[in-house]
Every structure is written in C-alpha cells, then in structure tokens.
Amino acid sequence: MKRLPEQLRLLPYLLKWCGLAGIVAALAGSASAFFLMALDAVTARREASPWIIWLLPLAGFAVGWIYLQFGRKVEGGNNLLIDEIHDPKHVVPLRLAPLVLFGTVVSHLFGASVGREGTAVQMGGALADQLTHVFRLRHEDRRILLMAGISAGFASVFGTPLAGAIFGLEVLVIGRMRYDAIFPCMVAAIVADQITLAWGVHHTHYALGVVPAVSAMGVAAVLVAGIVFGVTGMLFARGTHLASSLMKKWVGYAPLRPLLGGLLIAAAVWLLGSQRYIGLGIPVIVEAFQHPVAPWDFAGKFLFTVASLGSGFKGGEVTPLFYIGATLGNALAPLLHQPFALLAAIGFVAVFAGAANTPLACTVMAIELFGPQIGPYAALGCVVAYLFSGHAGIYRSQRLERLKSAMGEDAPR
C-alpha cells in the first residue's frame, strides 16, 4: 500500500501536541494567574505595612525549614527541570509547585528582593510533568512536555508568548536550540498567555515613546551599552552563585541561611530608610522609562537581590534583572547621548539576555513589550550582552554546546 504523504502523516503529531500542550497551558496559565494575583495582594500589604520587613528573618527561617523538611528533592528548582530535560530520570515531584509558590509569596510579603519567573517556570514544569504518568509518555516526549511547561510558565507570567516559546527552546543549551519542540512550546506559550489574561490578570505597560531611527551614533551607543549590560549580567550570575556557595559553606543548617539574609536585608532597608530595592521593584522600572533615576539604583537592586537569592529566599532572577538593566540603561543614557526610555528598554532585556544566555528570546521579548520599532537596537544590545557575559549564567544546569565566538577557545566546556 502506498505511503501517505508526509503532510498527512504529520496530522496525528499535530493533534497529539495540540492536546498535550493545551493541557499544559491550562495548568500553567491558571497557576500563573493565581500566583500573579497573590503577588499583587502581598505587595500591597507590604507597602501598606513598612514594619513588616522586620519579620523577614523569621519568614526566611520558615521557608528554609519547610524546604528542609519537604523540599529536598525539589530544591534545584529551574536547574532540576533543565537536568530532567537533558537526562530524564524521575518525574518532577508535584510538590515543587506549591512549595515554590508558598516560598515566593512569603518572600515577597516580607520584603525579599526576588522575582517571579523562576516560580512560574517551576510550576509550569512540575504540572506538565505529571502528564507523564497519565499518558505514559516516552522519555523523548517527556523532554518536550517539560520544555512546553517552561515556555508556558514564562509566557504567562510576563505576557510574552513568543518570547516564552523561544525561551523554552533556547535556555537549555548555549549554542543549540531544540527545534523538534518548537510546535508544542509555541502552542503552550500562546494558550497559557491567553488563559492567564482570561483570569483577569493585567501585565505592566512600559511607555517607550518614539524610538529614534537607526543611526551610526545610535548603533555605537548600543554597542557600548551592550558590553556593559553583558558584563553586568555575568557579574550578577557569578555573584548569586558565590553568595549561595559561601552561605552553604559557612552556615550548615539550611533554615539559618535565609534568616541571616533576612537580617541583613532588613538592616539595610532601615539604614537606607527606603524600600526601593526590595520586592519586584516594578514602580522603579516604570520610572526608568519616564525620567532620570538615581544612577546607583541598579547597584542597590543588584546587591539586595544577590543577598536574597544567595541566602535562600525563593523567587526568580528575571524581574530583578529587568530592574537592574532598566536603571543601568537609564544611568548610561546621558553618557551615551541617547533617550532614557530607549536605553532603559534595551537594558531591561539585554542584562537578562547576558545572565541567562538567551539573546533570541530577549530580542523577541523587547518587540512584544515595546513594539517592533525597537527590534534592531534590542537585537544588537542583546547579542552583544550575550557575547560579553561569558559561558556561565544564572542556570547552573545550562550546557555549553558551542562557544559563543571563535575568540572563546579557552571557555570551559
């Protein structure tokens, strides 16, 4: 009997992954919606009660103790998901989702400087992996399902479906993308974003204004800024890893690490007399697009976030990286004779591109958040930041397939 044309033989594949990715999207999108609503509520509570920062050490101890008792197998977080995609061994425990949700919400309520991407991605991946047993999936299908969960979580928490899809493909390996998963990741990301919106969630709008036409002066400025953004992303990744390693070396009992980190952060907030560098910091990011901000804001957020994540508070790195990048871009703007909003927008995505080694996802994110006019400048800034950020990033389990440039022969493989 004559074989069916390839296009017809693809139909079962299409139907299979529409179904699986749709389920993943429904789970991840709904989880992200609940998470974002909870973050809004606890952030409002913290801002209305500044004294609550003094309870951060106790909150840190509680989160550390709960993870010690119930979360040892899932403490790897994002790195656990990436490891399971590279080398599938065990289904990710479902308890990862409620544990990271609880840990992140508590961290934000009491004033840690953490983000939200890690939580959404971990919830998406953990929920997606439960389908492995339900549908008795093979290892290869399980890999794709986990990637779809990562894409769905990222897309739904930031409202960037295309960037989310690409992030799930790009974050695993430096120098190679898994195109066999592009359709499931795309479906999961787009549908998850729509489901989150259907729950009534609204994402922050950043007013970029008019983007200057591409010019030699503009390109030169973005090249210089991209180098600074890349080095900043590299320093952030190294700083968080170093802080975490030192805390584990010096403090043997895990719950004491966030307790000590909480004491340090609370004392710093008291000394500064400001809560500008705790929480997500979205109001400051919005400010960076509108007018000059303090040129040291990026350094303040950098240090508070390294202290928070390095001592064991739960959350993500990405929104703090947005803050660091936007405020650093704002500080560089007058030096490079460029509009504040333009360099804030490029810094917003480029520092993250360097720290996570995901220049394509970050370029697409810039276009989704700020409009297509920023595309050329954002692409240039993200790629330069990626090149100058080294071969290690915020995700320890990310593998190196190919060096970033021919000049990097000495990079560790």
Image (cartoon, rainbow, N blue to C red):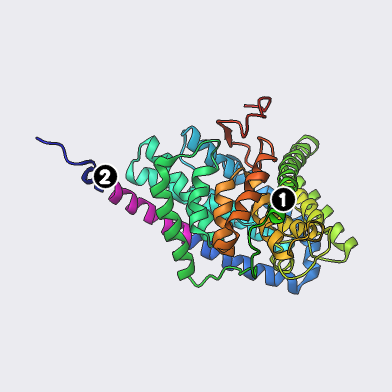
The answer to whether residue 36 is magenta is no
Q: In the rendered image, which residue does mark 1 sit on?
A: 220
Q: Disc 2 or 1, which lies upstream in sequence?
A: 2
Label 2 environment density (alpha carbons within 10 Å; few <14, some 14–19, many ≥20)? few
Contact between marks 2 and 1 (CB within 8 A): the answer is no
Q: Quadrant of residue 285?
A: bottom right
Which residue is nearer to you in this view: 385 or 406? 406
Residue located at (70% from left, 65% from top): 341
How far from the left and from the top, in percent, is residue 192? 45, 60
Q: Percent x, y for residue 333? A: 77, 60
Give the residues drawn in magenta, as a range.
Answer: 12-29
To which residue does mark 2 refer? 10
Q: Secondary structure at mark 2?
A: loop
Considering only vertical position in the picture, is 68 above or below 191?
above
Q: Quadrant of the N terminus?
A: top left
User: Based on the displayed image, in which of its 4 quarters is residue 211 positioned?
Assistant: bottom right
Can residue 355 be seen here? The reply is no
Local crowd size for mark 1, using a 10 Å CA cut-off: few (<14), some (14–19), many (≥20): few
Kind of residue at badge 2: Leu
Q: Residue at 35%, 40% (x, y): give it.
A: 137
Note whether 381 is above or below 323 in the view shown: above
**How far apart are labels 2 and 1 at the CA level?**
47 Å
Outermost left residue: 1
What amino acid is found at the position of numbered circle 1 in the picture?
A: Ala
At horizontal 39% and vertical 36% (from top left) the residue drawn is: 140
